[in-house]
Amino acid sequence: MRYLIISDIHSNLPALQTVLFDAQPFDAVWCLGDIVGYGPNPNQCIERLQEFPHLCVAGNHDWGAIGRADLSVFNRDARQALLWTQRELQPENRRIIITLPDLIEVENFVLVHGSLREMIWEYLLDVEQARASFLARDFQVALVGHTHIPLIFEWWEPGQEAQLLLPNWEEPLNLEGRRLIVNPGSTGQPRDGDPRAAYAILDTEAQTIEFRRVAYPVEITQERMRARGLPQRLIERLELGR
């Protein structure tokens, strides 16, 4: 099976549409949370995802959009975008977000937005945090999002430690016999200095994950955000990938 792995779409429909086209062929979509927040097309992104066989976990912005998270924990721009999203969400799409679990286990994989010890909120950015996640739950490969940065952590059994690996954009990551935490980066709002949409392809037969980037029409998303009165800083950062 070939799975399209996406995370942190953040209501960016042009980015999502470009990834869905670029990633073909795939059998299903696995989404690691934050379908909504920040961007101008929350309903359309939710509805587009429903068109494919898919699994999806909840993210912190998804929670914020349905009132499950206190908006005071978000920064001013994120809070303003979430208040707009709350007003914009159609009832059926709100129900879809409400039903999203915070963790999914399928085959040898675990899907979660943040980390294995704090599914919604923790950012996995360093080896000590990753080590805590490896120790928190028994799993082979965990797929996470939230940081908007493509990263890999590997469990090193002899020393009971985690190691940080950077994605190789030229060759697939071999999964066989390894214990890993993999972040594909953000589809809708990358923050690693590259504004192109990030995603990954998981091939369960070959036991590989391929990291990919694809350019999308950022200016369309920016214009839609301006039309909806979303914060200028959120508009500008899309073209910077930060």
Image (cartoon, rainbow, N blue to C red):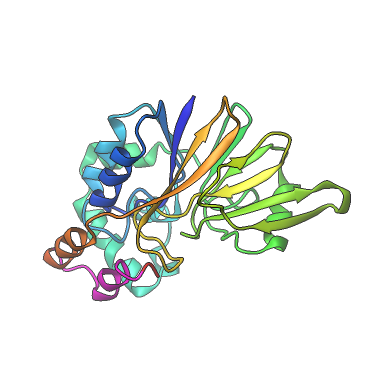
Q: Is residue 36 above or below residue 195?
A: above
Q: Is residue 241 above or below residue 132?
A: below
- Which region shows up in magenta? 228-240
Q: Residue at x 32, y 29 (%)?
A: 52
Q: Is residue 67 above or below residue 141?
A: below
Quadrant location of residue 53?
top left
Q: Residue at x 45, y 50 (%)?
A: 59
Q: Position of residue 217 (x, y in %)?
A: 22, 57
Q: Which part of the image, by quadrant, shows the C terminus? A: bottom left
Q: Position of residue 232 (x, y in %)?
A: 23, 75
- In the image, farthest residue toward the right: 158
Count the numbered circles shown.
0
- In the image, farthest residue toward the left: 227
Indicate left or right for 41 with 63 as reference: left
Q: Position of residue 27 (x, y in %)?
A: 41, 25
Q: Residue at x 31, y 36 (%)?
A: 49
- In the image, farthest residue toward the front: 170
**Does 114 lie within the magenta span?**
no
Taking depth in this image into account, of 82 and 154 the one nearest to the observer is 154
